[in-house]
Amino acid sequence: MTTTHDPSGLPPEYVRAAGLRAVPAQDPSHSPLWLPDETTAVRRTDGKLWVPEAREGLTSEEHFEQRVAAMSGELLDTDGLDKLRPLEPLLGDLLHCNTLARAIGPSGTFKSFVLLDMCAHIGTGMKWHGHYARQGLVVYLVAEGAEGIRKRVRAWEQHHGVRMDNVRFLPRPVQAMDPEWEVLTEVMRRMEPALIVVDTQARVTVGIEENSNTEMGRVVARLDRLREVTGACVTLVHHTGHQGEHGRGASAVKGALHSELMISRKGDRLSNFVLTVKSGKQKDEEEGDGHLFGLKKVSIDGEFKPDGRPVTSLVLVSLDAVPDREPLKGSAEWIIRELDRAGVPNTYGRDRLRNECMRLEIEAKTSKLEEVARVRKGRLRNLPPDLPPPVLGDTDDSAPDAGAGAGISAGQTRPAGAGAGRGQVASDLPAPSPSLRRGQVGQPGPICGGCGGELDTEWASQGHDRHVMC
């Protein structure tokens, strides 16, 4: 028996009674490994081998008491709970790191398009339609429909103007109960992805009775092992049953999931399709309302069918993107907005901003003013040349050249990243692929007549003047 836990605070008498031997972890993020009496090497999930000291001569009663003492040492009081690693969000409130998840829906609900869109935003670090995305490596197991994945990726890249970097595809199935699954698990352990998508569950469980809790329980154990060694969110794509409300097959799978996403579709043609992505199960979060999406057809540049028609695919467009929230008074974002409203030039440095803040009766510490100056100067860079010119005024010697885009508002939506406040400053925008011949869009889009948030351009072009929920 091998037990991994945090030994800090373990009473010395328990250690002596159990005869435990603590082996320090080489990685500070891992707890020490307590090895009571094993005589064989133990392989940790991080791949390291620990060889314990052999102990002999224990009676069965002593052996049992040893285990009792070891388990007693694992009990945590309320302070000990703070040592447990908290749940880390991966994509909004839908997916979390180091969990099992599943996306379900009837056939024809574009589940694969939704999951590919999620993968792309996590890989590139862009916000997922206004929601947080933690950037990381993504592995997509394309167990069915591999022939169509390329044009879906090219359409997404062309629509967003960026390469789908940091996403890897395996265009064939790997059976969960075959020995090759161990090979996949080791590959994933070495790569350490943040998200692993298995599309679909049925294609990696061929020959397994999906209605059997016993057989599917073994599959869940294989998936959980994959999660354990990688710390990734392992997400299955699966079809619903005839009722269309629950994932097809054994209930053992759903019981093991941390999150389950339900994807549904309304509409009878592409122009009025509305996809709903809703959390049907969350162990530690609110299930929340659904996210609404439309589909946009994209003609891929330079690609044509034999009859001359363009090669096309679909991309997801949000119908209810999160509108910008009012910034907290006194925050850097709020100060930037007030300075913009007062027409203060973006090129002003810390000292001149201090004078302007005094004039506008805004209280701000030096560190806050430095952050404000850095953000306002940063958005002068890498913006399209056709934006309005900056507000004219005195500039600091250290300021960058005043160029287009200096008058951009503080609340403009940008892709997610390491910028200050909402979204990403212009200098941190992902670089467009040279082959895509697209730049970042700086002009504001159409505005919703209900909430005042930005409308998707495609949605507005169809005559809509507000979000579906407005």
Image (cartoon, rainbow, N blue to C red):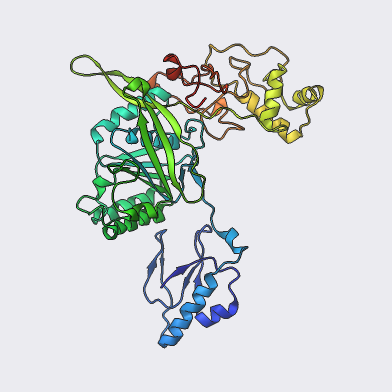
Residue 96: x and y, percent? 47, 46
Residue 407: x and y, percent? 63, 16
Quarter of the image for the N terminus: give it: bottom left
Hey, which residue is sitting farthest front in the picture? 243
Q: In this view, does 70 lie to the left or right of 378?
A: left
Which residue is found at the position 46% from the left and 35% from the top? Answer: 290
Relative height, residue 435 to residue 292 (above, below): above
Relative height, residue 235 to residue 228 (above, below): above
Q: In which quarter of the image is residue 214?
A: bottom left
Residue closest to the eye, 333 or 114: 114
Q: In which quarter of the image is residue 378?
A: top right
Whether residue 20 is visible? no
Residue closest to the eye, 95 or 386: 95
Which residue is found at the position 18% from the left and 18% from the top? Answer: 306
Which residue is found at the position 46% from the left and 33% from the top? Answer: 291
Residue 377: x and y, percent? 64, 24
